Amino acid sequence: MFRAFGPGSTRRLCRWITAALLTVASFAFAQPDSEPQIEAAYLVNFMKYVEWPATTRVTTTICLFGRDTLGPSLAGYEGRSVGGKELIIRRANSPDDMQHCQLVFIPDVEEARIGAVLRWVAGMPVLVVSDTDGFARMGGGIELVRNGGRVQFIVNNDALARAGLKPGSQMLRLAQRVIGGER
Amino acid sequence: MSKPSNSTLTASAVFFTFSIVFNPAIAALDDDLSLEDLTRAEISSVSRRSQSLSNVPAAAFIISADDIRRSGALALPDVLRMVPGIQVARIDSGRYAVSARGFNGRFANKLQVLIDGRSIYDPFFSGTIWEHDPIPLEDIERIEVIRGAGAAMWGVNAVNGVINIISRHSRTQTGGMLASTLGSNGQGQVYARAGASLDADTSWKISVQGRHAEPSKQAANDERSEDRLNNSVVDFRFDKALAAGSDLSIWANAGHSSLGDLYPLTPNLLNPAVLLPITVAQKTSTQTLGARYRWLTDRGVESSLQASLGNASAGLENAFEESHTRFDIDYQGRFTIADHDLLWGASHRTVSDEVWSRYVVDIAKGEFTQHTSGIFLHDNWTLIPERLQLGFGARWDYTNLGGGTVSPNATLMWTPTRTDTLWAKYSRAPRMPARAEYDVSIYTGYQPPNLALPFPFNLPVVFRAQPGSKKLHQETMEGVELGYRSQLAQQFGIDLSVYRYRYSDIVSSTLGSQSVLVYNPFVMLAVQNLDRCNCGNGWLNGAELSVDSIISTAWRLQLSYTWTQVDMDASSNPIANAQGRNTERATPRHAVSLRSQWNLSSRQQFDAWIRGSSGSYRTLSPYTTETRVPGYMTLDLRYAYKLTNDLELAVTGRDLVGPRRVEFVTDYVPATPVVIAPAVLVSARWKF
């Protein structure tokens, strides 16, 4: 099988690999729980456990900043009702986009731009979440941290307070760490 | 092994379609998973993090730190083998030929390589010196590989691809670490690191690494070659977060590599068909000090200013010595307003070199200072929110060696759904010939005597590449790419790209003057000069596929396939014509890689990697005839066991199956082909 492969054996190999992948992929769909999926589920949950200032909006929006790393995992939640509001997922790349967002997620590959995004949403009731190491310490709202085989989160209470957001007490209890004083 | 029939294939395809259509698990996972459940959920540790690139209009591939570790590789090029469109071939125990999208060679010159934004492309040789370890693999956060032109952003030489190595932030490397590897063929590696956080905003780390390999066996006679490798590198990083979203990073890096070789160079009276090898000792070293400051203005302009100072040398004992100092300064700005995401930048580089040589290499100017300056502007314009984005930009560079160049590029990206992306890209990218191409004369080829002919036509001929009468100018690539990326389901993604590029004015040669060289009273050689000229033209076509599939919480498969075809124009110039044919035949048509990552338990990993390439024909320097480099298919295996959270042991087998092989033969620089032998490595990593 591992002879140097000429055109014939290449074709044969390709066919084998395609067949194997297709079969294997068929089983794949039943399996949940990859890291992006857990992170996506966290974002949706934060929408339930954090209280935004009162509004007449009938929708609630999760914005994905920069390179889209969670989009495919969040697609399934789109249009659902979260806390009585319809959930919208959208991409956000500019300061103008921020006014539509209740939650902004910054993936770790966009680490260099965290400062800019935090500046854009300063003073707005927006919860900023990231899986970048050290994010909560940098002034971000909630940091998702990988701890062994689990994803946990750190809440920066001061940052939430500045944005006018109230974290639920259950959320604070479940957090791996809470930075800043209790309200 | 029986061959799967077309019906097997059809059956699996049908099964596949049905399972997508009828499987409810495609919908979001566990709607009612509470926050409490989430904090307890055990994630599949084979899953990749942050690697979906669904909204990037380029053929991009990301290698994570986990991928690097699980590859079991000791050298950076071996890690790059998993990327579709990147050709990696090992020459001996330390040397590699690495290129993006064809045109591979010992100094493949169309690939830009950057570490944290600093180029490690050698300005003298026009290529990357891969035998050198530029940074320990342990210190890499991720590698972003972008195939296709990056010249509009990264400048000249980013013609066929850019490899962006992003090092780990020092705050993630506090504490100590020791790692070591021992293996067959005298391979060994030791890595040590120390780091600390001084306060919440300040951290540093320093790491050192040494790597050794004993000589390989020559393919021709199984005798030991001279490719004993000794590498060392020390890398320091300091990071400080400053107020208001600004930060400062300082890097210091020094590395040294010594690697022997056998150059067949000495004419042999008794058997003029072959040249006798001489042993050469090659040494390279680099030192770099750099800093980067990023800040944010009140209006929201993001800025980054980076400067570095360094020197590097490369030498062959008693024959050649090149050293240079360089200074780089680079500014990049970014401002996002309304539908526009604007990026701009300016950079300057000064390289002062000094070259000394004798025997085979001659250089017109022993010293030269090259200045290169450039500016660029790029806009990503969202035409329809969430759906359609237009990107366009251009870069202008000027160098005192070859003049000015313009590199424009335009992309259009359509995301009809959250999980599908279609993109198209047009680009034009220049490559400036290197200093060596402008000023160096080198003996590159040897043709044994033809005793049937009368004197002086029966003399052995040596070919000498030298600057032509007309000054070289830039090579130009212009081309289009199309790509499709889809996350068919949460655990199954595919990424496909196709491209067609046109190359003009590639550096080739034309027949020059002839002379007779008296080597000694008994040996006379005819010298045929080959004058360099911008006289190669051709097409490059290719397709790349990567499929990433998480099969169960503990098992992931990743497939890469690359198809490459070079089609050079026929030329009335016989040398350029022959070099064009060589280029076509030197590019393997197919390459494939299938990686399996399997977590046997939370403490055990078992990985397998099947990879292969079809064969090619290359000219084995210094001879002028083509030799066949056979295709191969081989297997790497790795088993790792975590004794505690901080201590891991691993056994890796590399190149385990297949006949003994030569993976590459070099043209231009003479070399003795060696056998790529199977290797077994045992390693331990300890964090404390």
Image: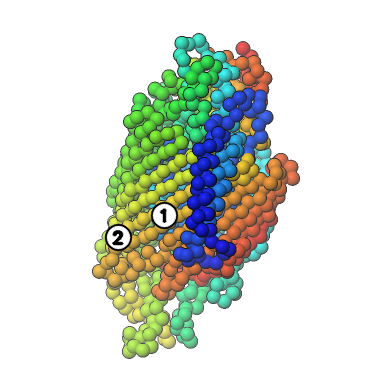
* B26 relative to B549, above or below: above
Give x and y (percent) for residue B142.
53, 43
For disc 2, the marked residue is B537
Quarter of the N terminus of chain B within the rendering: bottom right
* Secondary structure category for the residue under label 1: loop
As rendered, which of B129 and B204 lies closer to the eye?
B129
Which amino acid, by three-letter code, is at mark 1? Arg
Give x and y (percent) for residue B63.
53, 45
The residue shown at (67%, 44%) is: B177
> Tag on residue B243?
none
* Secondary structure category for the residue under label 2: strand
Within 10 Å of the Cα at label 1, are there few (<14), some (14-19), or many (20+) other Cα atoms?
Answer: many
For disc 1, the marked residue is B101
Which amino acid, by three-letter code, is at mark 2? Asn
* Apparent side of residue B376 relative to residue A120 in the rendered image (left or right): left
As rendered, which of B505 and B50 lies closer to the eye?
B50
